[in-house]
Image (tube, rainbow, N blue to C red):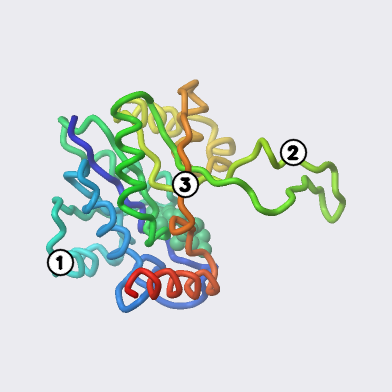
Amino acid sequence: MRTAAIVPAAGRGDRLGPGVPKALRPLGGAPLLVHAVRALAQAPSVELVVVAAPVDDVHTVERLLADFEWGAEVVVVAGGVDRRQSVAHGLAALPADVEIVLVHDAARPLAPSELAEAVAVTVRTRADACIPVVPLVDTVKQVVGDQVVRTLDRSQLRAVQTPQGFRRSVLAKAHAWAATADPAEVATITDDASLVERIGGCVVTIPGAPEAFKVTQPSDLLLGEAFLTRRRA
Ligand code: CTP
Ligand code: MG
């Protein structure tokens, strides 16, 4: 079964502060996007990586990625106005014979290729959709304004990472639902697995990895530099 990966990389990185789009910001001497594509391309199952780039930077990203030998085909498309639409643009660019699709944030540059492979193998062998998850370390409370409403049972909660993996038909159906559903409802959905859940699909979890953390704010880059230093030691 042919496996491809879509990399939503079209975000601005507002929470990281002023600068180039987040996927192009450096970590250990290379843009976040380069790290993310490398990990996917090194996963044995992944034959094609489709990057959804910021609309104004498609050619910049094409030139950047052309400088590397990846071990998989790499294609760049223009991203959309939000993450969901960037993934949809990637989906639209997949060849007809791709049956398994990974979706992986450029903002998670150090996710190990072993994690991508484990997600792909899980979908291939036993699931419509598979997501890597990690236990929560903080106590989690529901609040309204500054008032605590209740404390959630942390033991039942998981934080969700990428790469997430899907049967292509299931992901396409979920995105087709989102394209016509109530925009207010769709706006509350922050990942692809949630779209699959919403259409009644079954999503299984596998253990995530500390290195698959998301770069969101400046301190996350410090963590990334530390992981890279350890990796290179
Ligand atoms: N993303 C995308 N297209 C968008 C918005 C986001 O492809 N229109 C991607 C980002 O590039 C990132 C992933 O979705 O790889 C997760 O989004 P997030 O961490 O929110 O990144 P940004 O949107 O770039 O950051 P911010 O919200 O701080 O601006
Ligand atoms: Mg964002």
Tell me the residue that label 2 is attached to. Answer: 153
Q: Going by the picture, which residue comes out furthest to the front?
A: 233
Q: Which residue is at the front of the view, 178 or 225?
A: 225
Q: Residue at x 52, y 27 (%)?
A: 198
Q: Residue at x 27, y 54 (%)?
A: 51
What is the secondary structure assignment of the residue under circle 1? Answer: loop
Q: Is residue 112 above or below residue 177?
A: below
Q: Residues within 10 Å of mark 1 (few under 14, many from 20)?
A: few
Question: Where is residue 81 shown, x and y percent of the image?
Answer: 42, 53
Q: CA distance from mark 2 to mark 1?
A: 46 Å
Q: Residue at x 16, y 58 (%)?
A: 70
Q: Which residue is at the front of the view, 97 or 231?
A: 231
| Residue 33, disc | none
Q: Going by the picture, which residue comes out furthest to the top?
A: 200
* Cβ atoms at labels 2 and 3 below 8 Å apart: no
Q: Which residue is at the front of the view, 217 or 13?
A: 217
Q: Quadrant of residue 232?
A: bottom left
Q: Which residue is at the front of the view, 85 or 114?
A: 114
19 to the left or right of 116: right
| Residue 208, disc | 3
| Residue 68, disc | 1
> Which quadrant, please, contains the N terminus?
top left
* Cβ atoms at labels 3 and 1 below 8 Å apart: no
Q: Residue at x 27, y 52 (%)?
A: 40
Q: CA distance from mark 2 to mark 3?
A: 20 Å
The three-letter code of the residue at mark 1 reads Phe
Sequence-wise, the earlier of marks 2 and 1 is: 1
* Ligand 1 within 8 Å of the CB at mark 3: no
The three-letter code of the residue at mark 3 reads Gly
